[in-house]
Amino acid sequence: MTKGNHEGKGKIVQFPGLKDRLLEKGVQALEKGEVHESSQLLTQAYELEPDNPDINTALVLSLYESKQYDKAGYICKEMLLEGIGDYFEVVDMYLMILIQLHQHGEVVDTINALFDEKEVPFEKEEHFRKLLQFSEKVMNGKATIPEEASEVDHSSILSEKSLEEQTLIVAQLVHRNIQPFIGELQSVLKNSAAHPFLQTMILNVLREHGMDKEVVVAKFGVEEQVSPSSLEDVFESDFFKMVTDSLDDLLAQTNPTLFQHAQELLKRHTFLLYPFTIEEEPKAIASVYAYYTAGMFADAILEEELKDQVENTQSQWILTRLTELEEISSPNI
């Protein structure tokens, strides 16, 4: 693979935007699983601009997925030497490639050097330690390399972390390549025992990255398949807007402070529920939130005014769900 542009009399004239179109098409092909077409397109983009971090990263991933490990490793080395892209993201990819090439000695040396320099981010420490232990065991003949070993090890960014740590790690994924972590993220989404706050954050990350492949989401006794890219922003949904409008009608003019507290309560619960909602009439939901908030702040007059509206079966069910949601603590970050 030649690095750099052609020079001399035969210099190729580049069409405006060609590099960007090749990158876009290459990434789209990769997302569709068309790995060989993707690597061809991205290789062309790489030849046009070999120092572009997005092109380099996408090309390494496509070469990795198409099992062209030697080429992928070469580009990773160049990226590390020239400081292209996010350093630890590149190191991570490079280690996975080394494992596929059975170069466990270099894996051990690379990770030990990182720990010696004390530069490993906290969210990477456990992952790197597991890779180190695995490669050491292989070198000592105490472990065999399972099929897709790299994907198994690579997905451990959230395991054995506190909710606060997991939240910070997922938040960082908005601006990073998430392809190596897709498996674990999907596992969290379909795990009904996972914290709903974390599940919503993961859905938002997948939505921000334009993931159109359906994923299973299981929370609050509901399990559905959703396409993240087609989801609305949490607070742009019709559910949130209509309940907020109803709350506005109930409280904004008479008690603006209580309205703000009720809206904050609704925001927190909407985030926990996402992509699901409370399947009841917005006005009924708003009445319950106003009633509950009035009780929180000892507004006996408003509580009495709303009492008749929340004594029906529908409102009692909403109140039960609201109380359940309020018992779920959000991470302190």
Image (tube, rainbow, N blue to C red):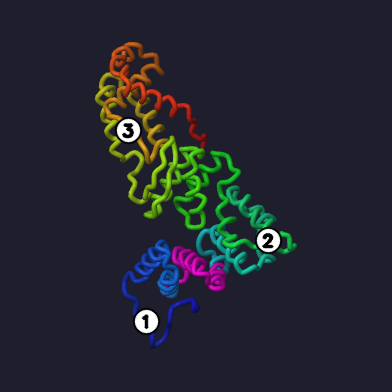
Would residue 188 be found to the left or right of residue 265 on screen? Answer: right
Segment tinted magenta in the rendering: 48-76
Labels 2 and 3: the sequence-earlier one = 2
Question: Circle 2 is placed at which residue position?
Answer: 135
Labels 1 and 3: the sequence-earlier one = 1
On screen, residue 235 above or below 78: above
Question: Circle 1 is placed at which residue position?
Answer: 12
Question: Which quarter of the picture shows residue 142?
Answer: bottom right
Disc 3 is placed on an element classified as loop
Disc 1 is placed on an element classified as loop
Counting other residues with Cα less than 10 Å from the Cα at mark 1, is it few (<14), some (14-19), or many (20 or more)?
Answer: few
Q: CA distance from mark 1 to mark 3?
A: 60 Å
Numbered circle sitting on residue 279: 3
Q: Position of residue 74 (x, y in %)?
A: 56, 72
Amino acid of disc 3: Glu
Identify the residue at horizontal 41%, vertical 86% (top origin). 8
Amino acid of disc 1: Ile
Would residue 164 be found to the left or right of residue 305 on screen? Answer: right
Q: Position of residue 116 (x, y in %)?
A: 69, 56
Front label number (2 vs 1): 2
